[in-house]
Each structure stands twice: as C-alpha cells, then as structure tokens.
C-alpha cells in the first residue's frame, strides 16, 4: 500500500534525516528518499508510536531505535493496521489518543471556565472599585469638574439679570437645597433662550433657560424640574458617568487619585454632551430623589409630573419639537409620570409651605411666550414677592455660613 | 551558489555568493547589502492568502524578496536580533519555525504556514507557524546562540526559547508549578516536547528581554 509522504530518521543519512515516500506491504514498512536511499523496517520489528506536532504522526521504529520511519499521511495508519501483528497496537494507540484528547478537552473547558470566572470577577471588582472611588472623592472633585465644564461650554444665550426672574429661581433653589441631601453649594444661572431646558453640572452649577420658565404654568413645575436636576448633583451622577466611560483602566487611575486626568476626561465628556445626559437608572433615581426633596421642602411634588405631562402633550402635537431639549435627554415620560405619582401617593400628604412668589410676574418677565394667565394655584402670590425673595436669599446665606 | 555564515555567534550574518541561474528567497527586510548586478524582485510570501495569514498570525512579512543575477555577485543577509544564524539543508523533510525566525532559503524550499495548535497559543507563540519543506538550504536566526537537541521521549523547554522543531515533535503547554504560583509568578507555562525529533533552542528569550526592560522602565 502507498505511497505515503513521510520521512526517515537514520544516522546513516546526512543530517540524520530525510523526507521519503513510504510503502507498506506484508514484509513491513519501506521508505525511499529522493536521493535514492532505501530503508526497511520488517513488520515483526516495528515498534509503533503515535505523536508528533499534529498528534497524528505514526512512527514505526526498530527495537534499537536506530531507524525510524514516520508519516502522518491519510491511510498510513490503516495500512499499518492491515499487518497482522500491528493491528492490535494501532487500535490501542488510537484508543489512548482518544482518551487523552478527551482529557485535554475537559482540561481546556475547565481552564476556560476559570478564566471566564476570573474575568467576570475582575470586571465587576473593578467596576465596584471605580464606583467606590467616586464615592470616596471629595466634593471638591465635583465642583472642579462642574466649573471646568461650565466655563468651556457654549451655553446658548445671554444671562438674565432681571431680579424678578433670578430672585424667584434663587429662592426655589435655596428652598430645595435646604432639604436636599448632601451639602453642595448651588450656583444658578438663568439664560435667555427659547429652549425648554434646565440642567445641572457636577458640584452644583445649575442652568435654567427662560424657555422652561415660560412653559411652566406654576412654580411647582419649575421647582420639580430643579429638584430633579439637584438630585443629579447630590447623587453625583456626573462623576458616575465619568467613571462608567473611564472603563477599567481609568477606574484604576481614579483609585490612585488622579484628579487632573479625571478633569481632562470630564471636559472631553462634557463636549460630547455626556455630563448632562444621564442613564435611565440615574434618571429614575433623580426623579425619586427629586420627589423626596420637593416633599421635604413643602412644595407640590406633583409639579414635576404635571410638567412631564405638558411636555408629553406638546410632543404629541409636534409643536416646535426641536426646542424641547430637556425632554430629549429625559425620555419615557409616560412611565416616569406614573412612577412619580405612585411615589407621591406612598409618601402621604405634604405639609405645604408654598414659596410666595408672583409666578405670573416671573413669566411675564421672561418674554412674550408667557401670554396665558397663571393657574389658580399660584394666583394668591402678590406684591409681597420682592420681600419674600429677600428672605429666601438671607436663608441661603445662612446655609452657606453653616458650612 | 555558495554561502557562509560570518561573525558567529553574536552578530551572525549570511554571505551568499550567487552566479547566473541561482535564486535565493529572503525575508523582505533581511538584506543588508549586495552587489549591483543582483536583481531583486518582491513577491507575495507564497500567494496572497497564505502571505496574509503568515503576516497576521506568523509574524512574517507580507512579501519576500527573490534575488537572482545574470553574472556573479553576492548578497549579505542579516536578522533584527543579535544572535546566531543556523543553516539547515532540507532533504524532503519539514521543519516548523517560530514567528520571525525565518531569514532565507534556496528556491527549492517551499514556504507554508501551519496551524500551530493551542499549545503554541497558550505558550504565547501564536496560532500559526511557518512550515519549511522541500529541498535546499534554509537559514533561520535566533536571539543569542542556537543549539539543536535530539529529543527522545519527553523534554521540557521554556516556550520563549524554542526557535524551531520538526513535525515529529509534539508540543504541549504545561503549568510549570502549581496553578496559583504559575498564575502569579509569570513563570507560568513551559512547553513539554516529546520526540522523536529535533528541536532548536535559542539561548536568550525576547519575552524575557521585554520583561526585563519593562521592569527597568518604571
Ligand atoms: Zn435628569
């Protein structure tokens, strides 16, 4: 049978080896090299081995191991097995190889399983470590990032200096800040732009657009949005976002306390809009914390739900959708309205301490969009407003002194 | 065609004297100098696909250079690592080379790429290896000195020191010590080779050099 591609090891060959064509017949195994040398291993002398780099190379060797003829060609094993005294060893070696490859596969699977387990443990370990590192960072980190962000941002409108507006917004934020967790210091800017938007940056930089004030029929609606935004600050969602996008390597750096690198990354993220758009879970958390803060502040927590509804309605009517920036970063309104109302129900009645602000005057001050008359709820606000604003300013100063 | 290896072992290079009709195939960046009457032709390292596979997985270059001449001249070939070069005459037998070891061969030598198996991958040497077969001389290089060893039965080598081996030799990655000590010491894996057949080892390891260099960069 044959010929088969193979080779010979023998000291008589130059270099001790050569490729050869093999044949198998009743006498045994024969090899002839391209140089014309021939070698034979009689069947009765042939000691079989199986191995080689592929695991499928058959070696036929003389008892003194001076001559080895080998091949991994297809059919060579069958040819060997056809010799009466070799059929037994061929079958045995094949069985042995099968058992070994089974063991190999099992070992590989076990090793793979272990690697995967280690990988998962490592990933979550670092993820957890990253979060823990964020928790451990001083409040100064949030403030630094927030300042960096707001200074390098195009805010998209001139600052509003009308005290009717700024005092009202400051009063709302001061009230909320008093009852929100954490002791962040809030800095509010009202900007003149049509966009219905408000956002908070890490550390307490809050930006409100006149478009949002004009859209809100009642103070509690704006207060609800601000409570939500303040919650993003107190829950440190901005830093969490940064930690998430840092990945494993960045989290490690963070663990080593590299604030400089962190700030650089934060600015990059901010450019990509990531600092003011949060994940679904973070939004849910901000809604929940926002409702708690509103409730604790003695304000109507349903304001945020009503504002959501208003946005929803206008979204359905496709009314100038491109200016609803806040909504585009806050999707799933239906579900969120339901969640907010369920939470309010579970909290029970609120001891309302309404802020005495003339909301209609505020809306009139922010522009022609505020053509509608104010709702009945805020109709009792009167000319006392300026005095109230002064009070709340004093309150916020007191709070600062407390720190 | 006449050839000799000069300045062995540390800074070995190959001088090949060629006359009309001789052809020499070499790794694309192996040529250090040559006489002006030598023609150089780049060709794919054995067909586009095989060349790509070799490039991607075997650490060899995409092109090989083929040198020929109408008269008489010489080519000086070298290798990137400081170390010895081995010349082996193939007589129909085959040899597997680890990535980067191949330098040159005569025209009768066939270059192929073979699946190296998981043992090689786990050992950090890649999934494919260069396969040289056919007839003629093949030159391959190493970092440090090269020594050959005939293996009968089992033998343990550090994977980073293995340069070449015959197909009759089986390789298996094995943990050098216990599971944990292997994992954390970095001395994790050794290769268990089993003969019959010949292996070529280099006296230095690039991986060890890289690790040593890294440890001094921090
Ligand atoms: Zn939000």
Image (cartoon, rainbow, N blue to C red):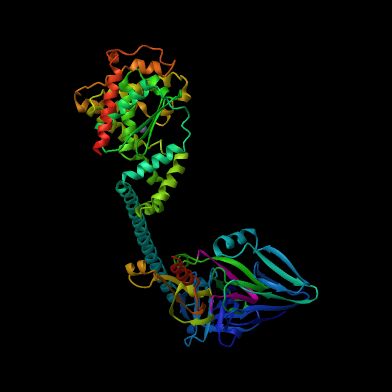
Residue A242 belongs to the span the image colors magenta: no
> What's drawn in magenta, residue-wise?
B126-144
Q: Which quadrant holds the N terminus of chain A?
A: bottom right
The residue under the point 25% across, 21% down is A354
**Magenta-span inclusion, residue B137:** yes
The percent coordinates of residue A67 (x first, y second) are 53, 85
Quadrant housing the C terminus of chain A? top left
Residue A322 visible in the displayed image: yes
Task: Report the front residue among A58 and A107.
Answer: A107
Q: Residue at horizontal 33%, vertical 29%?
A: A226
In terms of image quadrants, where is residue A364? top left
Picture quarter containing residue A175?
top left
Percent x, y for residue B190?
42, 72
Residue drawn at (46%, 43%), measured in percent from left and top?
A268
Pick whichever, B175 or A104, lies toward us.
Answer: B175
Q: In this view, does A150 lie above or below B96?
A: above
Q: Quadrant of ligand 1?
A: top left
User: Which image quadrant for residue A161?
Assistant: top left
Rendered location of residue A242, percent (x, y): 39, 44
Q: In this view, does B11 lie above or below A140?
A: below
| B91 left or right of A200 in image | right
Q: Can residue A26 be seen in this view?
A: no
Give residue B35's position: percent from left, percent from top: 75, 74
Give the total of numbered labels. 0
Magenta-colored segment: predominant secondary structure: strand
């Amino acid at each position: 049978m044959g010929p088969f591609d193979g080779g010979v090891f023998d000291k008589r060959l130059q270099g001790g080896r050569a490729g050869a064509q093999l044949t198998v017949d009743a006498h045994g195994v024969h090899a002839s090299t391209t140089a014309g040398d021939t070698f034979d291993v009689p069947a009765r002398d042939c000691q079989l081995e199986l191995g080689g780099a592929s695991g499928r190379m058959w070696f036929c060797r003389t008892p003194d191991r001076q001559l080895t003829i080998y091949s991994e060609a297809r059919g060579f094993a069958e040819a060997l097995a056809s010799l009466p005294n070799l059929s037994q060893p061929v079958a045995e070696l094949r069985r042995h190889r099968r058992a070994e490859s089974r063991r190999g596969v099992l070992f590989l699977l076990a090793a793979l399983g272990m690697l995967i387990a280690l990988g998962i443990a490592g990933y979550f370990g670092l993820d957890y470590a990253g979060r823990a590192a964020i928790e451990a960072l001083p409040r100064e980190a949030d403030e630094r990032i927030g300042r960096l962000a707001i200074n390098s941002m195009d805010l998209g409108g001139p600052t509003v200096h009308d005290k009717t507006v700024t005092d009202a917004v400051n009063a709302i934020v001061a009230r909320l800040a008093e009852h929100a967790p954490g002791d962040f210091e809030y800095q509010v800017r009202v900007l003149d732009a049509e966009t219905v938007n408000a956002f908070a940056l890490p550390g307490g930089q809050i930006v409100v657009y006149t478009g949002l004030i004009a859209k809100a029929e009642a103070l509690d609606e704006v207060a609800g949005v601000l409570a939500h935004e303040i919650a993003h600050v107190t829950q440190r969602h901005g830093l969490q976002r940064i930690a998430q996008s840092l990945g494993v390597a960045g989290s490690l750096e963070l663990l080593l306390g590299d604030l400089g690198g962190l700030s650089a990354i934060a600015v990059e993220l901010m450019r990509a809009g990531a600092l003011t758009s949060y994940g679904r879970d973070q939004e849910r958390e901000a809604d929940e914390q926002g409702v708690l803060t509103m409730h604790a502040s003695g304000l109507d927590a349903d304001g945020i739900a009503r504002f959501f509804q208003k946005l929803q309605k206008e979204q359905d009517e496709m009314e100038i959708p491109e200016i609803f920036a806040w909504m585009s970063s806050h999707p799933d309104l239906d579900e969120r309205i339901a969640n907010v109302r369920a939470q309010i129900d579970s909290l029970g009645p609120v001891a309302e301490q309404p802020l005495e602000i003339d909301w209609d005057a505020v809306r009139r001050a922010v522009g022609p969009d505020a053509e509608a008359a104010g709702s009945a709820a805020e109709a009792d606000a009167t000319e006392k407003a300026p005095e109230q604003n002064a009070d709340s300013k004093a309150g916020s100063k007191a709070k600062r002194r407390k720190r | 065609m006449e050839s000799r290896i000069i300045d062995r072992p540390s800074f070995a290079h190959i001088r090949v004297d060629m006359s009309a009709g001789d052809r020499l195939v070499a790794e694309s960046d192996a040529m250090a100098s040559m006489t002006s009457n030598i023609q150089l032709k780049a060709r794919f390292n054995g067909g586009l696909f095989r060349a790509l596979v070799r490039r991607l997985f075997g650490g060899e270059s995409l092109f090989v250079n083929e040198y020929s001449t109408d008269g008489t001249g010489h080519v000086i070939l070298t290798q990137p690592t400081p170390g010895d070069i081995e010349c082996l005459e193939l007589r129909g037998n085959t040899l597997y080379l680890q990535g980067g070891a191949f330098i040159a061969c005569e025209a009768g030598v066939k270059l192929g790429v073979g699946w190296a198996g998981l043992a090689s991958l786990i050992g950090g040497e890649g999934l494919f290896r260069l396969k040289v077969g056919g007839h003629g001389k093949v030159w391959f290089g190493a970092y440090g000195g090269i020594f050959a060893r005939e293996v009968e039965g089992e033998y343990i080598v550090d994977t980073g020191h293995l340069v070449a081996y015959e197909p009759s030799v089986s390789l298996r990655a094995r943990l050098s010590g216990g599971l944990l000590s292997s994992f954390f010491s970095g001395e994790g894996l050794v290769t268990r080779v089993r003969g019959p057949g010949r292996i070529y080892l280099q006296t230095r390891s690039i991986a060890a050099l890289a690790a040593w260099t890294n440890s001094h960069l921090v």
